[in-house]
Image (cartoon, rainbow, N blue to C red):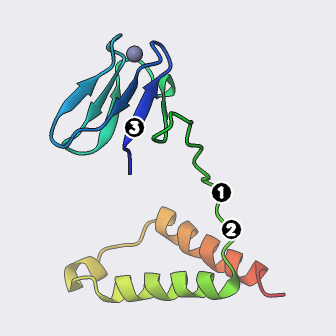
Amino acid sequence: MLNRAKCKRCSDILEIKEGELVYCSCGEIVLNGIDKRVVCNTSVTNYVEVDELGNEIVLDISSPKPDRKALLEMLDEMVKKIEEMPSHVMQAPVNHYDFASALLLISTILKNFD
Ligand SMILES: [Zn+2]
C-alpha cells in the first residue's frame, strides 16, 4: 500500500493523509488519501515510493514460474468460471481470442510435463 512518495523534480517526500490530497511543492505529484494512490501531472516516472527513512522502495514484480499443479488449477478455475456463467452467456459464441487463450494455457501446461 502506498504510504509515502518522493517527487523526483523537487525531492519533496509526501506522506499520505487519510481523506486528503497532499501536493509536492512543484505540483508534479499529488498523494490522494481518499483512494490511496499517487497522481502525476506529467509522468508516472516522476515519483518513487519511499519508506519512513526516505529510502526508495524497489518493487519486485518478478514472480516464480507457475508449476504444473498451479497451471492445472488455473485451467480448472477457468472451467469452473465458465460453468457458472448464465445460460444466455453459455450459448454466446466463443471468439478466436478466447480459443487462442485456452489453447495457450493448455500448451503451457503440456510443456511443463517433464
Ligand atoms: Zn515536486
**Of the numbered discs in the image, which one, if any, rests on residue 62?**
1
Q: Secondary structure at mark 1?
A: loop
Residue under pointer 2: 64
Q: Tags 2 and 1 in contact by the CB under 8 Å rule?
A: yes
Q: Secondary structure at mark 2?
A: loop
Q: Quadrant of ligand 1?
A: top left
Q: In this orientation, which residue lies closer to the viewer: 54 or 58?
A: 54
User: Which residue is drawn at the image coordinates 50% and 19% (left, top)?
Assistant: 8
Residue farthest along the left direction in this orientation: 19
Q: Is residue 56 visible?
A: yes
Q: Position of residue 80 (x, y in %)?
A: 39, 88
Question: As displayed, is residue 3 above or below residue 76?
Answer: above
Q: Is residue 55 left or right of residue 15?
A: right
Q: CA distance from mark 2 to mark 3?
A: 28 Å
Q: CA distance from mark 1 to mark 3?
A: 23 Å
Residue farthest along the front direction in this orientation: 53
User: Which residue is drawn at the image coordinates 60% and 43% (left, top)?
Assistant: 58
Question: As displayed, is residue 27 above or below residue 89?
Answer: above
Tell me where residue 31 sits by quadrant.
Answer: top left
Q: Position of residue 81 (x, y in %)?
A: 36, 83
The tally of labels here is 3
- Amino acid at the residue labelled 2: Pro
